[in-house]
Structure formats: C-alpha cells, structure tokens
Amino acid sequence: MLSIMLDLYSEPALTAFFGLVGGIILGLAARIGRFCTLGAIEDLYYGGSSLRLRMWGIAIGVAVIGTFGLSALGIVTLDHTLYLNRVWNPVASIFGGLMFGYGMALSGNCGYGALARLGGGDLRSFVIVLVMGIFAYITLGGPLAPLRLYLFGDTIPSEATYSFAYLFSSISSVPVNLVGMILGALILIATLSNREILSSKTTLFWSVLIGLAIVSGWAGTSWLATNGFDDLPVVSHTFSAPIGETILYSMTSSGNSLSFGTGSVIGVLLGAFIGSLFKGHFRWEACDDPRELRRQIFGAALMGTGAVISIGCSVGQGLSAFSVLSFSAPVTFIAILLGAWVGLKQLIVGLSG
C-alpha cells in the first residue's frame, strides 16, 4: 500500500501526511487526554500529583521500545536521526532548555500546548504560536543566528552516536536495539509503580497513543528516506522550528513544499479542534489584559529562541529525542522543568505581592 502511495503522491506530501496522522493523535491527546507539559509541571509543583507527569514516562517508555523495536526490524535507521548524528553541545541543551522552560511558564503553554489551545478556539494562543514560530526562524537563520553560532557553535555532523543505548551496548557488548528496548521497559516499570496511574485507564490509553505517535514519525520518515528519491530527513514530532516552517509555507506555498513538520502542526490543530468539539469545550477566547498578553509574547519569544538553541522543545527533546535515548534528552528536559519552575515561582510571588 505504501509503495502505491509513493507512486501516486509526491514525497513531501507523503512525509506531511505522516506528520499529520501523528499530529492529530497528539492534538486529541491534549484536548481529551489532558496531556500538557506545563499542566504536568503545575500539578506536581503545586498540587502534589504526579499523574500527568507520569503520562510522559509512559509515552517515553512506549516510544523507546517501539523505536528500537522497529530499528531491530530494519524499519528505522537510528543513526540517521537529527538527535544522534550531530555533535552534542551540553551547554546549549542546558541554556536553551532553561530559556524554553522559563518562557513556557510566562506564556502559560509550550508550543504544542499553544497549538492545542488554538485548536480549541483560544485566540491568545494564536499570538503565542505566531511569535514562537517567528523567533524560532529568527534564531535559526535570521538576525539572531550569528549570535547563536558565536555562543554555541553550529550542529556539526558526527560519526559518533550520542545515545545511551549505543554507550551501554559498547560497554556490555549487548546489541544496541536490545539495550534500547530494555531501557524503555525499565522506564515503563518505574513509571507504572504508582496506584494512581494504574487506576486511570484513560490516562494509560492516551499515554500509549502519544508514544506510538512518536514512533510513527520515525517509521514513516525512515521508510521514505529508504524508498524514496528525495533527500528527506528522518524526523519525528517537535514544535519549534516546524511552527515557523508552517507559517512560512502558508505565505510561500507556491514556491515551497510540504514537510513532516508542517503536517504535524496542522495535525495538532485539527486533532485539538476535533477533541474540543467532542468534549464540548470549543469556544472563542481572547485576552482582556494587555499585561498578560505582553508577558505571553515575551515568553513565546524565549521559547522560540530556546528551542532552536537546545535543538527541540518539550516534545522534541522530551519525547522524540528521548525515544532514541539521546544524551541531550534528559539534560534538556530537566533544564526545561527547572526553567518552568523558576518562571512559575516568579509568577506566584508576583501575584501574592
């Protein structure tokens, strides 16, 4: 069937389709399954509940097992992924993660969360999405690019593979894919050692689907890279530069082509729209307080810049990079959590003062 699709449709259209399918799942998970980066952090910091944060653990575990399982079958080529075939810069991961997390707290959403809210009718999120996408491209190849390159250097291709699975495999002589699946299983076991998560079947269901959405991205783009003629990258879901890419495509589609990121962004919007209708939550909302809007714009600019520096947002590093057990994933994700904690604490202190 896939071979027939390759004959009927262009490769950019197909890679956008793979992004669209996974994006719809992620959009539905946000609106129906309540999967949210900042919401999970707020629940843990201020509510004492780890339920939504454990959704990340399950999604990561499923994504790791699925990705390395497909690698064992020869479907996914791990060393072609962006997170593994470039020299890792720990300073960029930490600095970019802190910047992204702090900006996320100020904005009230990450890029993925803003897309999900926009799909539910929140016009404030339209501003966040727009500013984040623009600043991602300003940092990637615009006026801030020289400063980024001066401070952190460029992403240099490397023959070494920056993955915990490859590291432990080289130490133990156990096959890489087996090591990856074992580590994924350990993440799952650790996450499921909690009665609250085990008793919530809905949470388990959406967590597994999120992990499978990440796997589907790797599988689809790997298949195209292997069987197609275009030099398309092997990628999965992230929501920083792809938002800017989608904005750019909307203005230059006649001279530009679709991509996985464009399909993913549109998919989240569509999935969130469907999910909000299903839950009866769709309604148009706007910002009444200009001070709040100013804070959200500043936060969105920080997120767009920070995500490019760290090569991924909370989803890009927290799920996609984690699924290949990249060195950068836990470092960046922890930095995002710390940055968000600082931002949330500042907001609470400001409100109480």
Image (spheres, helix red, strand yellow):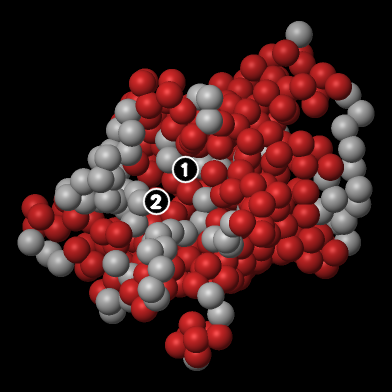
Residue 337 shown left or right of residue 218 in the figure: right
3D distance between C-alphas at marks 1 and 2? 8 Å
Q: Secondary structure at mark 1?
A: loop
Q: Position of residue 108 (x, y in %)?
A: 70, 34
| 1 vs 2, front mark | 1
Residue 219 appears in view:
no
Q: Could you tell me residue 56's position as x and y percent?
A: 51, 52
Q: Circle 2: is it few (<14), some (14-19), or many (20+) Cα within 10 Å?
A: many
Q: Amino acid at mark 2?
A: Ala
Q: Residue at x 56, y 21 (%)?
A: 342
Give how far across and how far down residue 17 sits, in percent: 58, 71
Rendering quarter of residue 300: top right
- How crowded pointer 1 is (Cα within 10 Å; few <14, some 14-19, many 20+) is rated as many
Expressed as whole percent of the image width and height from the top left, the position of residue 220 reads 45, 72
Q: On the rendered image, what quadrant is the C terminus found in?
A: top right
What secondary structure is marked by label 2?
A: helix
Q: Give the residue pinned by disc 1.
A: 312
Q: Which residue is mark 2?
A: 321
As drawn, the label of residue 103 is: none
